Each structure stands twice: as C-alpha cells, then as structure tokens.
Image (cartoon, helix red, strand yellow):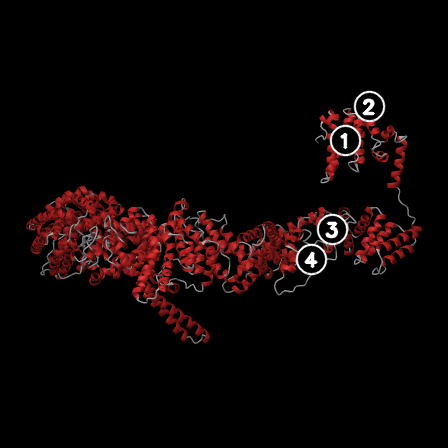
Amino acid sequence: MATMLPAEWIKNWEKGGRNEFLQLCRALSEDKSHDSLSFRDIQQALYELSSHVVRGNLKHEHASGVLADIIEFREDMPSILADAFCILDIETSCLEEKTKRDCFTQLVLSCLYLVSDTVLKERLDPETLESLGLIKQSQQFNQKSVKIKTKLFYKQQKFNLLREENEGYAKLIAELGQDLSGNITSDLILENIKSLIGCFNLDPNRVLDIILEVYECRPEYDDFFVPLIESYMYMCEPQTLCHILGFKFKFYQDPSGETPSSLYRVAAVLLQHNLIDLEDLYVHLLPGDNAIIEEHKREIVEAKQIVRKLTMVVLSSEKTEEKEKEKEKEEEKTEKPPDNQKLGLLEALLKIGDWQHAQSIMDQMPPFYATSHKPIAIALCQLVHVTIEPLYRRVGVPKGAKGSPISPLPNKRAPKQADSFEDLRKEVFNMLCYLGPHLSHDPILFAKVVRLGKAFMKEFQSDGSKQEDKEKMEILFSCVLSITDQVLLPSLSLMDCNACMSEELWGMFKTFPYQYRYRLYGQWKNETYNSHPLLVKVKAQTIDRAKYIMKRLTKENVKPSGRQIGKLSHANPTILFDYILSQIQKYDNLITPVVDSLKYLTSLNYDVLAYCIIEALANPEKERMKHDDTTISSWLQSLASFCGAVFRKYPIELAGLLQYVANQLKAGKSFDLLILKEVVQKMAGIEITEEMTMEQLEAMTGGEQLKAEGGYFGQIRNTKKSSQRLKDALLDHDLALPLCLLMAQQRNGVIFQEGGEKHLKLVGKLYDQCHDTLVQFGGFLASNLSTEDYIKRVPSIDVLCNEFHTPHDAAFFLSRPMYAHQISSKYDELKKAEKGNKQQHKVHKYITACELVMAPVHEAVISLHPPKVWDDISPQFYATFWSLTMYDLAVPHSSYDREVNKLKVQMKAIDDNQEMPPNKKKKEKERCTALQDKLLEEEKKQLEHVQRVLQRLKLEKDNWLLAKSTKNETITKFLQLCIFPRCIFSAIDAVYCAHFVELVHQQKTPNFSTLLCYDRVFSDIIYTVASCTENEASRYGRFLCCMLETVTRWHSDRVIYEKECGNYPGFLTILRATGFDGGNKADQLDYENFRHVVHKWHYKLTKASVHCLETGEYTHIRNILIVLTKILPWYPKVLNLGQALERRVHKICQEEKEKRPDLYALAMGYSGQLKSRKPFMIPENEFHHKDPPARNAVAATVQNGPGGAGMPTSLTINTAKLEESAAEETDKLKEKSQGTVKVINKTVNATPKVTTSNGNSASNSKIIKEKDDKEKSGKEKDKEKKEKIPATTPETKALGKDGKDKPKEERANKDDKPREIKEKTPKSDKEKEKAKKEEKASKEEKSKTIVTTIESKSVAEKEREKEPSREKDVAKDMKSKENTKGGEKIPVAGSLKSPVPRSEASECEREQKRRKVDIHSSPSHSSTVKGAAMLPKVPLVSENYSSLRVISIHFLQDNLNELKDSSTKHYINHTTPTLSKSKEREVDKKDLDKSRERSREREKKEEKDRKERKRDHSNSDREVPQDSTKRRKEENGTSSSKHSKSESPSDSPRSNEKEREKSKSKSSGKEKGDSIKAEKMEKSSSGSKKESRHDKEKEKKEKRDSTGGKEEKKHHKSSDKHR
C-alpha cells in the first residue's frame, strides 16, 4: 500500500510537513462520497504518523500537537486513534528494542487527554495499560474481565418457570386477540404487555413468540402488529426475532412437514419493514443453495434425455418396455418433493410487493429456476399487473374494451406504479426479465405487455419529440426489443396454440423494420430453445409432431393436416417451418399440399415463414450445384418453386426476400435469381419460357389483355392483388431499379467473374437464368408501374449505359416502356390541347409527340458508340429500332380472333351446361362478354396505334441510313449494333428483328440492301450459333425462322415476289454508294435468280449445320440442334439437303446415346420431326427452277439477256463482298480437306484426253467465245472503274486479284471434292450395292436429285478456296481440255444447252430437260443476279458408275470454274453441288473396285461403244445451241461479256474433266474401266438413256462449276463482315 506521509514531510515537519498533514486529514475527513475508503485512509495516516514517532523520526510532542488539531475533524477520531495505538502496541510488544517501546508509551501518555480511558482500556494490552498508569495491576484486570465474559456469554439466564404464572399468558393472549378496530394502539398494548411480563414473571422471548403466533393468525392487522413488534424489539436483542423465526421454520423441516403460508407471510412482512435481515433468516431455510443448483442441472439432463428418446427410432417391441419404465419413473416423481422454504418465502415477498428482497433471493438461484415454479410465476405476474395498471389504462386498452381494473397493493413499500414508458424501465422490464418464458402462465399479462409495446412503437415512430426525448426513446426501444427476445417469444413457445396471442404479437411486430424482426426470429429459432429445459422439451415435441403430420400429408387430407399444422405453428413456428422446409427440399412433390395446408397460419407465422425460407436459402453448408457441376441443385429449385407459390397465395412481406436476392447479386452470386424468377412468375403471372408456341408468341405482341389470355401456358388468374403486393414491396424498399441494374451487370459477371471454375453448361444456364429473370422482371415493372413511378426511377439511356455500365440491349429494354409511356402521354396532351378528329391531325400530333420525346434520346445515344458508327446509320434510326416493339409494328389479328372465338365457345358451353346454377351462369357469361369487349377494344386501339407508327416511320425513313461509306458497311453496322444483339434478347425481340428488316425493306428505305441483309444473316451462322447459350440459340432460331418465312413467301410465288420485291430498292443488284434509280428494271434481281439465291442460302445453312454437328463440341451441337428445330417449318425444303442433315443427325444420335444423353434427346427429337417433314421436301430442280418445256429454255435465256447486259459493274462490288464473307467461313473448312485436294489434282492431271472425236467443232466455238468474253470483260472492267464511287475501289482491286487467283482455287477445290466425298461418306459395301441397284431401277429417281452428304459439299468448298495457286493451272488445263472435248461439253455459265432430241426415250428427255432447264436458267439468271451471293447447284446423281467418275472430275473442274466466276464477280451461281452425289460417287467408286476384276474386258468393249454414241449424240444436240447462245451473248453486250468470262472457265473444266475421264479409263485404268463398264451395263438396256445420263452428268458438272464461284463470293462477304 502506498504511504500516505512522504518522508519529506517528516524531515521538513516544522517548515511545511505539519501543514501538509493537516490538509490531508481535513480533506479525508470532509470526503463524504466514499465513507469506508476515507475511514481507512485516516486510519492509515494516523498509524503512519504514530509509527514515525515510535521509530524516532518525529518527536512525540510534535505528534501530540498535530493530533490535538486533528481530533476535531471527525466525531470518531479518538476511536480511530485508539485503533492505531492498538496495532502499534501489538507490534512494539514483540520487539526487543526497548527504545521503540518507550517512544510508544511516551506518545500515548502525551495523547491521554485526546482519547478517553475507557476506549484505551478496550483496545490496549493490560500490561501497556499498567505501564501507562491506567490500571494498577494487569493480573487483577485480566481476572476481572474473564469473570465478566463468563457471566455474559456462558451463564444461562435462569427464569424460574415455576415462578411464571399461566394466567399471565392467558391475559397476554386476551390482550393480543381483542377487537383491534377501536382506538387501541400498539403503544397501549405494549404497555399492558410490559405490565404482564413484570407482574406474572413471563419470559420476554416467549412473549415475542406468542405475539408472532397471534400475528400469523390475524394477518389483516399489519398496521397494528408491525409497530408493536418494532417497539417490543427495543427491549430485546436484535437477533432474537430472527432466531425465533428461524426456530419456527426449523420446526417444519421434517420430510413430512409443510410450512404454513401464514409463517411465510409474517417473515415477508418483517423483512419488508427491515425488522430482520434477509441474510440472517436465509441461513435458517432449506434446501441449501447447492441442492437447488443440483436439482436444476438434473432437470436439464432429463430434458436432453427426453429429446434423445423422441429423436430415436424405436421398434414397437421396445416401445412397450419404454412406456412401462416411464410410468414407473413418473410415479416416483409424483411423490411430493420436500418443501422449498426459500421459494415459499419468495412467493410471500412477491405477494406483498417486496420486490427488492424477492429479487435478491432469485439472484441466489439459477436463472428462471424460481419462476419455473408456477405459484411464483403467477405471483410475479400479479405484481407486474399491478405495477403497469395506470399506464395500461391510459395507452394500452383497445377501443371498446372495458377490462377489469386492478387495485393497487395496500402496501406503501410496494414498487411504484408506472405512469409513463420511462417508468417501465425502472422496475417492470426487470420483473419481466426474471419471468422469462414463464410469462406464458398469464396470457392476459402477455397481451397487456404486447399492447404497451404497440403503444410505445406508435409514440416512437411519431416525429414530434425533442433530441433528449429521442435518446430516451431509443434506449426504451432497445429495451422493448430485449423483452421481446427474452420474454415474449419464449413465452409464446410455451403457450398451447394460442392464435390470439400470436396475432397480438404481430400487431407490435409489424411496426418493427423487417431487419429487427428477422433478427428476433433468428435468436428465437437458434438460441432461445437451448436456454431452458422446458423449451428444449417443447422443441423436441414440436419436431416429433411435425414429423407425424408431414408423414401423413397428401393432397386429399390438406384440410385436416392444415389445421394440425396451424395449431402447431401458433406456438413454435420457427421449429415447424424449419422441418417442413427441410422436407420440401428433399421431396418437391410436397410443395403443392404444403402450400395449400398453410392457410390456417397467423400473420406472425407467415412472417416467420419468410424468415425461415431466407435462412434455408442462405444456408452456407448447402451446395448450390449438383455433384456433376452442370445443374442447379434440386433443393434450391424446390425452395424457389415453393417461394413463388407461397408468396403468391398468402400475404407475406416480400422485402426481406427481395433484399436477399439483391445482396446475393451484389456479391456476384446469381444462383438465387431462380427465386426472383419464380416469385415474379407466380405473383405477376409473367412467364418466361423458351418453349412458347408461335400462337403464344403472336399473342404476346398484342395488348395486356391478349397477353394474359393467350400468351402464357398456365392461365394464371387473379394476379392483381399479388402483383400489387410485389410492386409495393419493390417501391417501398427502392429495389425495382437496383435489381434490374444488378441483373443486367451480372449477366456478364456470370461469365467473367462467377463462372471461372464452373462447367460451361452451368455457366450457360446461369447466364440464361439471369437474362430471363431480367426480361421477366423488366416486363413486370413495365406493365405494373405507373408512368410516373417508372419515369421517376429509370434514368436516361446514356446514364444507364455510361454510369451504371448496363449493357445496351438491357438498357434499352428498361427504357423502352418509358418512351412508350411518355409518347402516349404527350400525344394525349396534344389531343386535348386542340381537338381535331381527322386521322391526319391525329397522326401529325402523334409524330410531334414522338419527336418531342425521342429528340433527347437521339442525342443521348450518340455517346454509346464511336463517331464512325454514325457515318452509316443515323442515331434516329438506332433509337427507333431499339425503342419500338412488336406491338408497334403489327396487329396480331388472328390471335385476337382466336381468343374471341374461344370466349364464344365458352359462352356456348355455359349456356348448354344444365347443372350450373343460374346466378353463376349469369356471372360467367358476364365475365366472358366483358373479356370479349375488352379484347375487341384493345385490337382496335392497337390497329390505330400501328397505323400511326407506320406513318411516323414513313416520314423518318429517308434519314435512317446515311451510307457515307458503303451499303455493305451499313448493313454490317445494322446487323452488329441492332439486329444481332436484339434478336437473342427475347423470343418477341427475335420476331421483332425479322419483322423490322422486312419493314425497312417495305418502306423502300434508301441505302438499305435487303438482299445483302438476308445474305449476311443466312451465310455465316456458325460463329453466331457457337457463341449462344441454350436459350439464346432458341431465340436465334426463332429469328432465323421468321426471316426464312419471309424469304420462303417471296420464293413461293412469282406474283408475290413481283409485288413485294420486284420494284424495291432492297433488291437492286447494282449497289451504288448513294442514291438509286428505282425505275431501272434491269438493275433488279428477277424472280428466277432470287430462287437461286434462296437455294444458295439453304445450302449455306446446311453447310453450317453440318459443320457444327461434326465439331463434336457440346455447345455447337446443342445449339445447332435447337436452331434447326426452330427453323424446321421453312428449312430444309430441298430433299438432298434434308437427307444430308438427316444422316448427320442420325450419326449424332448413335454417337451421343451413351456419352451425352441431353444431346441424344435433342437429336432424336429433331430427327423425328425432320422425318415427318420429309414428304413436304422437294427435289432441288423444283426448288429453284420453274421447269419450262425444253424448247423454251433457250428463249428464256435470251429474254433475260438484256437484263444482264444492262447491269453495270458496280454490282460486282457487292457480290465480291458477299463472296468474301463466305470465303472466310469456308477457308476454315478447307484446311481439313487440303490433303485430299492434292491427291485429286494429281489424278485429274493424270487423265489427259478422254475427248470424243466430235469435240473439235465445239471446242472451236468455245475458243471464239472465250476470246469475245475476254474482250468484253476488259471493257466491263473499264466500265466498272468509271461507275464505281471511290468507296468501292478497294473492292475492285480485290476483284482483280480474285480474278487471277480464283480459278486455281476452284480447280483445286474441285479436285478435292471427290476425294473428300470419298473420305467423308463411309458407306458399307452392301449399302453401295443397294444404291447402285436403286439408281438403275428408276430413271425418275435420277431426275429427282438425290442428296449427297453435306459434308462432302462443305469439304469441297473448303478445298476450293484453299489452293489459289493451283487454280490458275487448272483453269488453263480446263480451257484446253474443253476445246478437245467439243460437242459433249456443255458450257456452264452463260451458255445455253440445247434440248435433247426427241428420238431418245421420253424419260431421258424429261431428265435432260430438267437438268438443262436448271442450267439454262442459271446462266441467264447468273447474269442478272449480281447482288446475290453465288449458289452452288447440286448436281444430279447419275446411275452409271462411269458417269459418276466423270461427275466427280467434272465436279472438281466445275468448282474451279465457279471460283473463276466469282473472281469476275459478275456471277451469282445458281447451282449448289449436291452433297448426296458426292457421297454416292464415293460409294460407286468403291463398288467399282470390287467389280473391276470380274468385268474388265467387257467394260472396255462397252466403253468404246458408249464413247462413239456419246460423241454422235452430243455433237448433234449441242453444237447448234452453243453457237446460238454465243451469238446472243455477243449481242447482249455486257451480259454476254460477263457470261463469257464465266463461261470460259466453266467450259474448260468440263473438257478437263472429260479428258481426265479418258485418261483415268486408260492410264489409271481399272477404276475408270469399272465405272464405264458399270455405266455401259446400265446403258445397254437403252443407249439413248445412257446418253441422256451423260448429258445430265455434264450439266451437273456445270452446275458445280458455277457453285464454286458462288461460294467464293460468299467467302468475300464473310470476310467483309469480319473486317
């Protein structure tokens, strides 16, 4: 302990030490705040001063002088000084040094006048007293003191009981038992008692005992007895009363004894009046505290054992034994426990209102031990009732309720009653905390407390109070929350299904923010139940009961089970729902019955259910993915589904759930969007599904009523209330826009942040889920928020994109409803302003409204893209495209009619229904009629709106496309920034994009090339398809389907084509940079050529599909199958393409059956649908040739000639681009096949001269033609240069290069084709033989094109494009060979074939006509169709082996020719090389190998015969038409030049092919021989037929040639795109 007197003070005592010491003592004696502390400090100070004297540091005179000054500071100062002397006396007496002892005695002597003798005699040692002279002899003094102590403590007071007279006690009882109602006072009676004691020699202790006994019997006279006992106690020692009471309690402590409540009461009153101390009495009471603690622990253990039993699975045999044991135990328990006197006293204290003493007894016991005894709980509840009475009467009583007022306790020492909320804090909250869960014993008090809480919350939430009051209210609010957590909720758990209490509690709870409520539920569920043995039992019983109910819950017994669930839930909702949710997560078929069974819950329970759902969703231990990591876990899907159903059906607050989803999104987790999706779907009736039928989709383009009636799968009725609730929750908590923005941002987050380690399939699923939920949620906001709400919340487009980084498609999606709202409100304003009813006025006002609303948008969108973009498309066009919807473009009349008819049928059914009561009939009919009227009104309204929109677009269209660079660039920008992002946004947007393209075409928009646009869309789908998710692929498929629908409509009928496209600028084949002369018919693409173009698109789609199917990539295969399924109505239309697809899909089915079942299912589905479409497919020659009689073919070409001639070279620019784009695509495919190319080239070169003798004349004529063509092409180039605008020059350069390179490529590719074909179509020998037989069997089948695999096609094309260097050589070879070939050769491009003479069999004629027609029309068209991309024609497959061989060679050469054509860029090919043929070729070749050995000799003979026949025949047939066509071409000027350019390459390949055939037959020998022999064998049946076949083959070759060029052009297009 630190010294009070520093050494310096003692050294400098005179100077300053004395004063310092005085000041210290004064300060200590004046300090009243800590009495006990200051007392000890003074003691220490005096002790230290004295010890300094003893040690000789200070003179005793100085010390006595300062002590004399100090002694007046406190009354007890002499006593303190005596204590110091006492300690020093003991210390010095032990010392051997006499000097210190002397110093001590001198000090005491000098201070004798300060301390009285008596005090010193008490404290000091007798020997010291003797040396001080205070006593004479210490020995005598000791003896005397021993005697006195013995007398005091050991000698018993002997009352001579015989001297006591019984009469005295009789009189005493009479005195105490008299009527006390008069003027008798306790003082008067006390005097009488004293007299009786003295007179009758009564024992005073006994008298006190009798007074207590009488008081017990007359408890109502507190006011008399308490003062009496108090006065009487002045005569006794203080402990006497306590001892007597203790003796009384001891008397009842036998096991059989029961302490009377009157004794408890007397003890309690005496305690309250402080006549005895609780500590003194407490020791007399049983049981001891240790016993109580033991008992409490035992209860907890028992509770846990009960829980264990309930959770254990017990077999029936064991059950009976268990029950018997339990009964025995219960019997043991029923034996009365020994009386707990402490609890009895506690109860009495509570009853009389002595809260202080009661509290101190409860503090000695374990928590809630005391109140777990019902009498104590009830007594405490009663005390609380009394305390809160005035406040409850003032603020808590509900209107109209009387209630029974409670009178205050008569006891003035009871706690003060509460008049304000502040008073509750002092006592009431404390009392409630001691009660804890046992408030359940008094439901009325529970209700009162809750009502007070409600009243407090009302006051707390009103804003009128000052700052100080607010702080007090905050403290009170936290107290209310604590009471709710510790008292109200646990008590509710112990109440037996009291629904009223639950509703009362909700009255208070609903005033709390959901964050506080959920916190309370969390504590209740996870902590409260473990805090008390009773609650532990209740939890176990609830789970047990819940299991019992859930096991028996079915759809049939929903009502009774629901009632049982309701009963259970009133008291323990958290435990029950936790179990129910765990079952739902395991068994999703429970969802419907559970949702239906929850109708008996209280509002509080619904709120708890919402909390439990969120807790289950947020469970960190649960995996959100299945083990395969490719799908979302089923528990999450089940919970989401349950959420949607339960939130829709019942009025549960949504804020917490929505905030949870928003928080998850903020954290970059999108799994839980599943919940939002389900909730919006069920509550608002807005469904998002990719499986919509076209009828539904059509209905979705109408008004709200039509959407609701025809747009969704489930007719979700009565969503008005639930969608209103959802809207309110979103607006009240400001979650509408944040959720939208978070979803829009999370779409990319799924890929780049969330999807890091996840399986690609899962990432796609999450992306789709995120996107679909955004679309669904945005749709909900658009249809449910008022205009003001929406506009107030959604910022402008530039802010959305630039500040919130929302992707553009999502940003416009959110803004679109805003524009529509704003325009309609502006339009209504203008209509009201000036009333003109003319349609014209209305339209004008509408356009004004649009301009006013959209002008700022046009400004805003400029910042979204680089300035270069706006060179091609105007901001106005961009904004218009993104701001319109299908509702604005077209009215779904058929959909409206369909729904109206449905309603009519319904009304008829209602009329016919005899069982329906009349009033219900009337109601139903009224409903149907009202709906019908609404639909018709909506249709009319939409019709007017669409007309206005179209008027507006008509006015706008001239400023849409600026085309400052090229039209090609314009289309690129349009597709890149508008069509592609939007067509995969939603199914309706996909339809919208297709319609919009058609609309832009129909509006005759300047600078918009419809042809180019469609070409781009169909030519290159591989990359687009590969980069889609599953749902995007489905939407992309819908888009392609709608585009194909339009194209197919135009393709189907010349009249429609002429009407809708004939004179439209979109079908100009000369694409100038700006302006167009629509009047020039020659610039338009004519109908036949358009059909070729469409065929080319179909071919391109096939090629892309096959490529995707062959990659083996999951995404490619899945997506292309989805797309193909969607476009099935319009593709494939051509038989051979369909067959090729079918084969590939069949292969997928086989390969994926075991590996990837989902792909297998998709492929099987598609395969089945494809087969069912087969009857509607047509042969290729029917698809893009009208099949006129053979004679007219020549004439037709002549007519088409001038059109070709009139075409300026500027057309070539676009074709070039088209080709480039395709080229890039095919380049990739080429690489695979390059190996094969080389081999084939060698074989081609190895087969030199297989020409017939008649070849010379034809070859001469061809040579002349070629020269003419060259001259013309030169002129054309000049023209092109002149006509082209500077922007197009790069393309012309490209042309030049292409012109040189392409022939080589073509040749190579052509060569490659057969090789590839062989490699790619692995057919078994048997199949090959079958194929041959079939071919022989019917010539009609020949005329129909048999489809070879698409693979071969695509490969061939790849090869073509691959080898530019070889092409040149091949081209030269071809020319020379063509010359040698002569009459047999059919000029491919530009040359017309003469019809086969009639002398041949009619079948042959027909076939030949078909083929010729194809070829004839194709040259003429080719001249005109420049804007379109080139379509390779599918050659027909001939039956003869030799012809097949020839075909394969021709095919190669034709491809080369096609490439040349593409290089001249005047040509659009009409013929697509058939894949099927190539496959068949391979098959044939293999078969030929087998048959070679058998029939070599025979074949040689037949070969010679056949060659002779062919020569004769071809010379006679073809020479004349070729010459005539040449003349016509020359007359036609440019057209002929173009033809000739294309012609010469095409011709040459043919000659090459024939030469190759010959060389093969001779040098490579066996193969050719075999093929020829086979052919001869077939032909032997009819020579004429053979010849016709041969012609056909040639025609096919020519077609192939032309296809090559077309494909190249496609490549150019694709490359343009990529650029």
Q: Amino acid at mark 4?
A: Val
Circles 2, 4 touching at the beta carbon (< 8 Å): no
| Precedes in sequence: disc 2 or disc 4 | 2
Front: mark 3 or 4: 4
Residue beneath disc 4: 386
Q: Which corner quadrant holds the C terminus?
A: top left
Please provide percent x and percent y for residue 827. 35, 61
Residue beneath disc 3: 342
At a point 81% along the width and 25% down the height, the residue shown is: 103
Q: Is residue 1054 left or right of residue 1517?
A: right
Marks 2 and 1, how far apart at CA: 20 Å
Whether residue 1125 can be seen here: no
Mark drawn on residue 47: 1
Task: Say which element carries label 1.
Answer: helix
Please provide percent x and percent y for residue 425. 65, 51
| Precedes in sequence: disc 2 or disc 1 | 1
Q: Nearer the viewer, residue 158 or 1393?
A: 158
Marks 3 and 2, how far apart at CA: 59 Å
Q: Which corner quadrant holds the N terminus?
A: top right
Marks 1 and 3, how far apart at CA: 45 Å
Marks 2 and 4, how far apart at CA: 73 Å
Q: Nearer the viewer, residue 1383 or 1028?
A: 1028
Please provide percent x and percent y for residue 1355. 23, 48
Q: Amino acid at mark 2?
A: Lys
Mark drawn on residue 98: 2
Local packing at callout 4 (Cα closer than 10 Å; few below 14, some 14-19, many 20+) is many
Local packing at callout 3 (Cα closer than 10 Å; few below 14, some 14-19, many 20+) is many
| Precedes in sequence: disc 3 or disc 2 | 2
Whether residue 1132 can be seen here: yes
